[in-house]
């Protein structure tokens, strides 16, 4: 598939990588998405409203052009979908760039349940299919908020699947958001792969396991960093070996070139607590954006670390008694103590982000 | 995590691999699932009903113990979820072993839509949340079938995520199904990875990209097939290199040892049409089970190839005019001709499988 080269000045990457967008294909969905993005953004430019791009869910890295296997990043999209609701409650219009079939604002309260969707339903006395009594109250209030967001054109849902689709969308949306000036906010909660397979190194067909070796559609010689065009996935005896290139650091481009006036918030997810703060500060320094929100895989639902040039380091925590039962086993002892109504940490994160955004709008940026 | 060694005679693998179940941990969910499986199967043994184990969705291969990244197999679970409904309509009880959050029987008609879940809902004149008029009729008939299946205890939903969870469940369920004798059917529609990372070679924490190299939690030396205990994923300069072991061929164990009296149906998904038939016959010969259903990624929704010892090769196709609009772009020209009501290919596959199952029950196996 030939790349549709859109390269303009900014497609040469700050970090010295050769241009990504000239060698990786423009996704088919982009033009259709632009046709809904353009009027959405123009409307909010007119209204001088704040607009948050919330990215959510994991990106895939296909191992074949006709994709049977892919590498994925763990994410149900909870952080992004939940945050999007609180941005809407805080007066923001939200562009929700999400992994297809990941959690969505509002519907998240009822989807990805371990029960079947239909367990919420029942047949009324009049034979109508209605929501079961125990879900009525919650469903009604959620439905109300969702319908208001739709009616007032405050929420735009855009799906992606691969890391390539994500990167093309991020660049396009960032450039479309420029007219918003400082009213634009990037809340990059998606779990974006650090590694990918360049289009030129992707095999066409499903990689055959060794038992079917006669059918294998590529050589057995192992590829190395030197042989740039060798297939990224290949058999080595009975083993499957995959070597992936680093994804160019687009955050630098976003901050310096694509949307320099917007507030930009990135996330750092780690599993090793000893490196979280250091890596978050490192990212803030390296990309000189506005805020890094650091979080640990096991505790992400009740504590995050804000690292900003303006505010330094600041932990935001849900009080033990307000922690939801949906947190991981690591904190089950705390959950047993939970007595009060659970509090979603995004209800603490988003207003604090909005406050920092107000400072940037009134005082100009700290970076 | 220490492996809970359940190994009995059958855990030594036919293909000479050292025992998988002694070295890869028993999933925590298995005991709870057994407690619902045992009475479900016992009930249908009493009733002499046929029981189909339908596996569905893709398996994950985690790259770290604290999983941030994983390899996945493309599958929404459409084949499995749709087939499960037709097995129920054909009088089978169904154990639905599915990837968590993949499509489920019945709810599949309304989930994984590109619309939001809440677009099906509306508020009635009485203020109740009800299903929107245009969806009422379809939802009512689906809900009816779903509630009957639940009421008559004909459907058991069991989720898995990783390939290790899948393999432990497959072995356990197969052994629990032995008392069903020839009334047992294995319909293995899940997209199971051919490769995995043995527990002993999995790194604990998220693999750090080279920019954070000071933090990397493992060496840079590349692992090879010889160094069995070297981490399966490691950095090589700026590249991420992953080497995966082949998954032992459990189908052989299933046929020969775990559940020899059941009818066993496997699937072959390919992207290269030139090898589909040959690979399907190869698999049937190699594992000497009852039926291989071959399908192509692009045409799987309107044609499949049955390869069986009894019946030879047989294509099953949906007439062009009955093909659903949900097929891939590859067949859109055909879709434009579609005039009649769409027909799901599983409504043709399942009765044919049931017919072959009847032959095996009455005449004994052909293998």
Image (cartoon, coloured by chain):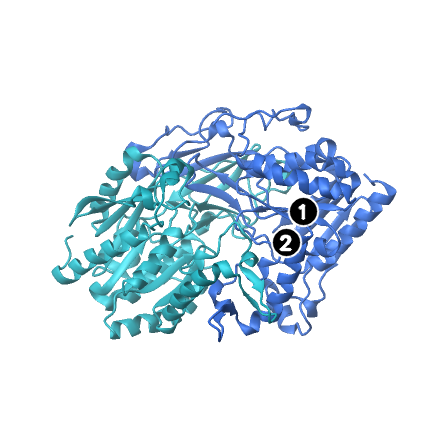
Chain colours: A blue, B cyan
10 Å crowding of disc 1: few (<14), some (14-19), many (20+): many
Q: Nearer the viewer, mark 2 or mark 1?
A: 2
**In-image side of A190 versus B319 (left or right):** right
Q: Which residue is mark 2?
A: A79
Which numbered disc flags the more N-terminal residue, 2 or 1? Answer: 2
Q: Residue at x 30, y 60 (%)?
A: B87
Task: In the rendered view, tell whether residue A164 sits above or below residue A349.
Answer: above
User: Disc 2 sits on a residue from what chain?
Assistant: A
| Numbered circle sitting on residue A192 | none
| Badge 1: chain ID | A
Q: Using the rendered image of the protein, determine whether residue B367 is visible from the camera's viewpoint.
A: yes
Please tell me which residue lies in front, A34 or B353.
A34
Q: Are the residues tagged 2 and 1 within 8 Å (C-beta)?
A: yes
| Quarter of image, res A337 | bottom right
Q: Split into 4 quadrants, where in the image is the C terminus of chain A?
A: top right
Look at the picture and state if B330 lies above or below A299: above
Does residue B194 sit above or below A151 in this rendering?
Answer: above
**Residue B174 visible at all:** no
| Residue A148: x %, y % from top left | 67, 57
Q: Circle 1 sits on which residue?
A: A267
Residue B60 position in % (x across, y down)? 45, 50
């Amino acid at each position: 598939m030939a790349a549709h080269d859109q390269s303009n000045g900014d497609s040469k990457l700050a970090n010295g990588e050769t241009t990504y967008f000239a060698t990786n294909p423009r996704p088919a969905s982009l033009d259709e998405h632009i046709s809904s993005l353009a009027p959405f953004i123009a409307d909010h430019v007119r209204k001088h409203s704040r607009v948050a791009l919330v990215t959510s869910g994991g990106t895939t890295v296909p191992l074949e052009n006709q994709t049977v296997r892919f590498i994925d990043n763990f994410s149900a999209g909870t952080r992004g979908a939940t945050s999007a609701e609180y941005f809407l409650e805080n007066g923001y219009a939200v562009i929700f760039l999400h992994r297809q079939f990941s959690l969505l604002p509002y519907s998240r309260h009822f989807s990805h349940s371990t029960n079947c969707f239909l367990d919420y339903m029942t047949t009324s006395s009049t034979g109508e299919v209605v929501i079961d009594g125990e879900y009525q109250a919650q469903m009604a209030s959620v439905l109300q908020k969702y319908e208001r967001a739709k009616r007032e054109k405050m929420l735009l849902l855009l799906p992606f699947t691969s890391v390539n689709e994500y990167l093309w969308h991020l660049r396009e949306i960032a450039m479309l958001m420029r007219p918003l000036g400082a009213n634009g906010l990037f809340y990059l909660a998606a779990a974006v792969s650090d590694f990918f397979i360049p289009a030129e190194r992707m095999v066409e067909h499903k990689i055959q396991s060794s038992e079917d070796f006669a059918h294998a559609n590529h050589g057995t010689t192992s590829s190395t960093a030197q042989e740039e065009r060798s297939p990224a996935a290949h058999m080595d005896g009975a083993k499957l070996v995959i070597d992936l290139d680093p994804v160019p650091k687009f955050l630098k481009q976003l901050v310096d070139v694509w949307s320099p006036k917007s507030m930009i918030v990135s996330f750092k997810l780690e599993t090793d607590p000893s490196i979280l703060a250091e890596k978050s500060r490192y990212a803030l320094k390296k990309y000189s954006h506005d805020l890094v929100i650091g979080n640990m895989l096991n505790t992400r639902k009740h504590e995050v670390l804000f690292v900003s040039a303006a505010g330094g380091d600041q932990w935001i925590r849900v009080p033990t008694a307000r922690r939801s039962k949906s947190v991981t086993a690591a904190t089950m002892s705390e959950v047993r103590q939970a007595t009060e109504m659970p509090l979603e940490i995004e209800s603490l994160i988003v207003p604090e982000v909005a406050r920092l955004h107000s400072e940037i709008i009134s005082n100009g940026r700290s970076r």
